[in-house]
Amino acid sequence: MAQITLANATVVDGTGADTFHADVLVLGDRIADVAAPGSVQQGRVIDCEGLLLTPGFIDIYSHSDLTLLLDPRASSAIYQGVTLEVIGNCGHGCAPMRDIALARTAMYGPVPRNGFFSWTTMAGYFDRLEEARPAINVVALVPNGQLRLSHIGVEQRVASSDELRAMCRDLEVSLDAGAYGFSSGLEYVQERACSAAEIDALCSIVSKKGGLYATHVRDRDQHAIAAIEEAIATSRTTGVRLQISHITPRGGMGDTEAALALVDCALAQGLDVGFDMHTRLFGFTHLKNLLPMWVLEGAPDDVHRRLLDPRVLERIQQHPNLISAVGDWAKIVLVDSLAFEAFNGQTFDVIAAGRKVSPFEAAMDVLRSDVEHLQRPMVLLKT
């Protein structure tokens, strides 16, 4: 059994206690002892003088569902001390799914072409993840976006009673397969029509199984506080443990403080509510989120044809979404377009001026040109 002593470290043990100096003895894959410096040095000794030693960090909010299959080394996590990622956030993920072509619209990352996906269930996804042998531990949430795509498709409406029962069944099967909880992305096009009653029904199942509900709340531009109140009401009604994803509203520090006050009030009432927050003052999402779901249906040629139709373009301009909600194309930056590589890093007002079109038409040009790779073009949303 391998023996390693991490000697003379400044230990941050994760309990909130003060830091302290210690030697930490590791036998095999277990910590065997934590003692005063110089008292337990065995095996290979690594001098950690001047360094912090902590438990592995948990990344509560990750979109590495596909990335861990494509590159299981997880270097970006490991180099930051992350040893566990929670995936399946914001209603996006890799299972369960029925129509794989449609399911691709609720995945993050460079989605491979057809033939890559050998599973449709959460159990099948876990098997594929085990085969990949990722370098970190993984906890998966069941994405509401995939549940709705599986049973409602591209229609923007509340689920029928039969559809909701089918979604609840898929959720329960996925939880029994090993998923840790459930997530929603109520600001995304796949879920904008999802009602609070639907979420409550699904979260009742999660609560009974002791799982976690993580939510990207709806309408973080104008009604973010009401949306956080809705999420807390779900926790109060169902008893589910709640995680509010990137809690920061887009209305400024006043709204942020109001949001945090709501969490404090919920905690005082005995609810189990947590949150995470971006460490940046900008948003980041796919450019395709400008489009209604029905525009994305079918093959790339179908999408391209729609994006040339003036009647479709007029409907797209009227479609509420988290990109147009910014309200100023000078605050929307193009990132990672393949066809418009020369414009990456520029705002859409600048791109539009260079092409002598409107910013909206410039965005449609990017989507038409990158239609074979719609997961690639991203946008940075400035505050």
Image (tube, rainbow, N blue to C red):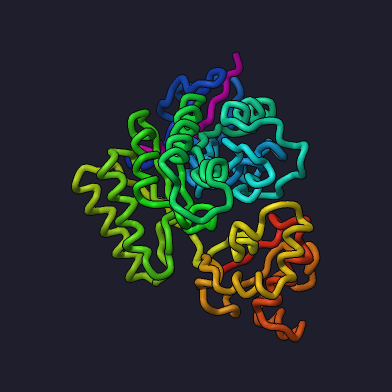
Looking at this view, is 226 or 294 the one in front?
294
Q: Residue at x 30, y 50 (%)?
A: 232
Q: Residue at x 49, y 67 (%)?
A: 281
Q: Residue at x 55, y 21 (%)?
A: 29
Query: How far across and down, in percent of the image, does residue 278 sit?
Result: 48, 58
Q: Residue at x 64, y 71 (%)?
A: 333
Looking at this view, is 151 or 69 the one in front?
151
- Position of residue 211 in the picture relative to residue 96 (left or right): left
Q: Which is the main secondary structure of the residues drawn in magenta?
A: strand
Q: Residue furthest left?
A: 269
Q: Is residue 358 above or below residue 164?
A: below
Query: How far across and down, in percent of the image, does residue 359 sit?
Result: 66, 79
Looking at this view, is 154 or 334 the one in front?
154
The stretch drawn in magenta includes residue 80? no
Instruction: Judge whether residue 10 can be spotted in this image.
Output: no
Instruction: Judge whether residue 371 can be spotted in this image.
Output: yes
The stretch in magenta equals 1-15
